[in-house]
Image: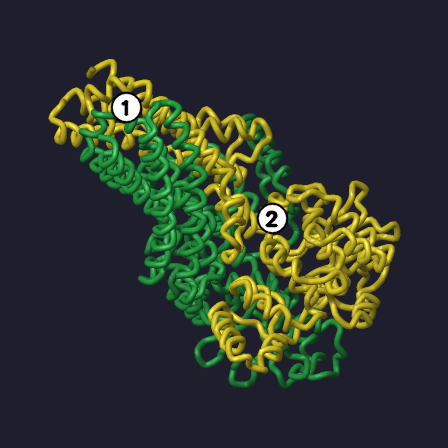
Chain colours: A yellow, B green
Amino acid sequence: MTTSEARARLETEELQEKLREIQALLAGKGTGLRASLDALHPADIAYLLEALPPEERLAVWDLVKADRDGEILVEVSDAVRESLIAKMDSKELVAAAETLEADELADIAGDLPPAVIEEVVRSLSAEEREQLRAALSYPEGTVGALMDFEHVTVRDDVTLEAVTRYLRRLDELPGHTDQLFVVDRRELLQGTLPLARLIVTDLEIGVARVTVRDGLRLNPQDAAGEAASAFERYGLVSAPVVDADGRLIGRLTVAAVVDYIRQRSADTQLAEAGLQQEEDVFAPVLDAFKNRWAWLAVNLVTAFIASRVIGVFADSIVHLVALAALMPIVAGIGGNSGNQTITMIVRAMALGQIQDGYWGKLLARELGVALLNGVVWGCLLGAIAFAFYGNVALGGVMALAMILNLLLGASMGVAIPWLRSRFGRDPAVGSSVLITACTDSGGFFIFLGLATVFLV
Amino acid sequence: MTTSEARARLETEELQEKLREIQALLAGKGTGLRASLDALHPADIAYLLEALPPEERLAVWDLVKADRDGEILVEVSDAVRESLIAKMDSKELVAAAETLEADELADIAGDLPPAVIEEVVRSLSAEEREQLRAALSYPEGTVGALMDFEHVTVRDDVTLEAVTRYLRRLDELPGHTDQLFVVDRRELLQGTLPLARLIVTDLEIGVARVTVRDGLRLNPQDAAGEAASAFERYGLVSAPVVDADGRLIGRLTVAAVVDYIRQRSADTQLAEAGLQQEEDVFAPVLDAFKNRWAWLAVNLVTAFIASRVIGVFADSIVHLVALAALMPIVAGIGGNSGNQTITMIVRAMALGQIQDGYWGKLLARELGVALLNGVVWGCLLGAIAFAFYGNVALGGVMALAMILNLLLGASMGVAIPWLRSRFGRDPAVGSSVLITACTDSGGFFIFLGLATVFLV
């Protein structure tokens, strides 16, 4: 991030106040607005733009100084970025993009018109062009897509004194420089020199003697999630990224990792609810429809299958209409219990806590939990069904169906993530829809089937 | 965290290999195991302990050097910590706890027997005792509960030269020291001195001249979530925590923030699925039952209400059994669509994007999306219902019920988080259960009610 050291850092409450202040200024055509925006950090302007409805958003965007457009575009969410870029002409876009580092440019390149990118690329140095190419070449979800190129390197055959003199000439160090990267004369990474160590060590000592050699090293192909776990475990601020030969090509910072963790947790949450991506809360209705229709369609298919299962047992329902009232309970609680199992397992898998040999053990445990739950809730519900309908056999069928559907939910709750990971798919996405589909159709089938055999 | 600089940092894949290696060594009663464990970072040992089943876990725990017990206990999950502490006697626990900093001790104090805590407190210095008291006094979810006390302070009336000499005497700086905290003679925080700036500035210059005065300042009562957002927005590594008078009392680091973000996102995910807390995947069946029963009970009540709604319309179902097969579709898709709305809104609220004046606008937008979805899916389903049952009126009722239930889902998807936040509750927890309860009972009522009026 292009730093703006001189600007105040605010907590969310203060930002909310700013937001109200800006809206008051906008409403009164106040002249203080431009100055008020100038005093804000780019990330805060991004925050305000996201919280404003379209017209006010664009009015504020017009007042932001042009030389800050680039850094703000990097900060805003994808949906809002699109709405801002749509209002800028090519010249403005080129000017904004030219203020960015190669890795930032790569982040927003997908939203820029090709002609703009072409012109920006022409203005880059050969080194920057190579960095941009590298940043764009790694797929989302890899370390390469998250890394930046603002690392400071020092040679291992000089003294700390020489390092200190070199750093003074730089005037300012890039953000998140907690350590310098130590390379030999062939640019091979030897290790790192933490600033904290540089500061407390005698300056006559050579770099090689104080280099930390067993720190984390990443490759650009590494999964971002694994790198994020390592940052979390070790409490890292930065880590070097090297190619297959051990040559330093970039670095990963904790800021990029925090963004990644937040984004991934948001994506999971959204996907579980059937949203394809984050929505701009002020986006038109049609945009929201496009974002949501796909999962509703999937749900429609699974609900339709469940409906057909019920259709098969129409005669039984006509004979004993209590079945229609009781069947959603069996299906619903099976779904809830199956969701508990699958959530617990998907999470443990993400934390690397489930090894290949343990699936059988896990299944046994989940079946045990389901059996216990089934007996407790099944008997309770059976008793309630008996109380309402005065039919002992109905109560018995209810209890048995509950037990069986909970066992089905537990089996599928273990089987679905296991199968998905076998086939190299993310076990989290769609897990809730899949398990509910099983326990709905399965629950109806079990309950109505048992009722048909024993009651009708 | 007590640092262990000399130990290797591994990526998850390498850790998984270590895990297999350790199990092989355990199985063969190999003697290399202890040495292999000694070479690992405490966070990695914590990772391995969490991934091992009970007997192997305790076997490994016995082999870990006693002086590392404390730092590992801080790293493991709550559930696993309990299982480890249960196997240690008071003497071992006191020895382990005594190796910890005050803020770490506060983190695990809840799991230690009172007698152990008493003995540990006796061994603390007056300053540490005060820190422990402070750390324990702030409730979970505040900055005070996350802060540590390992900050380095310097006075604003000395030169950078003097600061450098002082730091050299310290020998090692605490982890995550990216800046020193500048105080005046009354201990009031004046600002911060970034190490990166210290390194590139002339040493004759006074601290006051290079102090950054507009950085983020936190109070211990501030919400941890808001502080985490600020860390994310500004890409911070550390920030000072001051009391009401502006006196420095501690600091928050990005490591604590990353832990907090992960934990909160896990908690949300687990709560949505109806789990009260994270489970040790190898915990006994009864522990899992206790963790899960409460939400199943809630679900039971909501499912029972939906069942009673159906019971009211028993006569209509007997007249037209197709209703029983079609009603779960109306309820299910309403629930899915309502979940999309509530997830989007809860998330936007967490990001501070919804101001008080916009609720009406939001409701209108969500109703628009629901209407569009309702018309599209309702007509499709109506047509399918007609195709299957050859009843035009049934198709019409199906379409109308879908539209109305989607509108209900959208209204409740906006109303539930709005109401919950009005009453100062977390809008996320239980959101899925509440919305599904509305769209289930509501969907059955709307569909069966319309059918009773128009078809029976």
Residue closest to the eye, A311 or A32: A311
Residue A67 tag number: none
Can residue B116 be seen in this snapshot?
A: no
* Kind of residue at disc 1: Ala
Residue depicted at x 44% and y 26%: A361
Which x, y percent locates residue B108?
42, 54
Judge left or right: residue B314 versus residue A299. left
Residue A184 coordinates in the image, percent (x, y):
85, 52
Tell me the residue that label 2 is attached to: A228
Q: Locate the C terminus of chain B by quadrant.
A: top left
Instruction: Give the CA distance from mark 1 to mark 2.
Output: 44 Å
Residue A87 place in picture, x, y as percent: 65, 62
Q: In the displayed structure, would residue A166 be above or below residue A230?
A: below
Q: Are marks 1 and 2 in contact (CB under 8 Å)?
A: no
In which quadrant is the N terminus of chain B drawn?
bottom right
Which of pointers 1 and 2 indicates the residue nearer the eye?
1
Q: At x 44% / y 51%, what residue is drawn?
A: B368
Determine the image quadrant of residue B116.
Answer: bottom left
Q: Residues within 10 Å of mark 2 (few under 14, many from 20)?
A: many
Q: Which residue position holds label 1?
A: A401
Question: Which residue occupies the foreground of this view, B417 or A193?
Answer: B417
Q: Is residue A371 above or below residue B340?
A: above
Name the chain under label 1: A
How many numbered discs?
2
Q: Secondary structure at mark 2?
A: helix
Q: Is residue B29 visible?
A: yes
- The amino acid type found where label 2 is placed reads Ala
Q: Earlier in the sequence, mark 1 or mark 2?
A: 2
Helix, strand or loop for disc 1: helix
Q: Residue at x 21, y 15 (%)?
A: A454
Residue at the location (65% across, 76% down)? A6
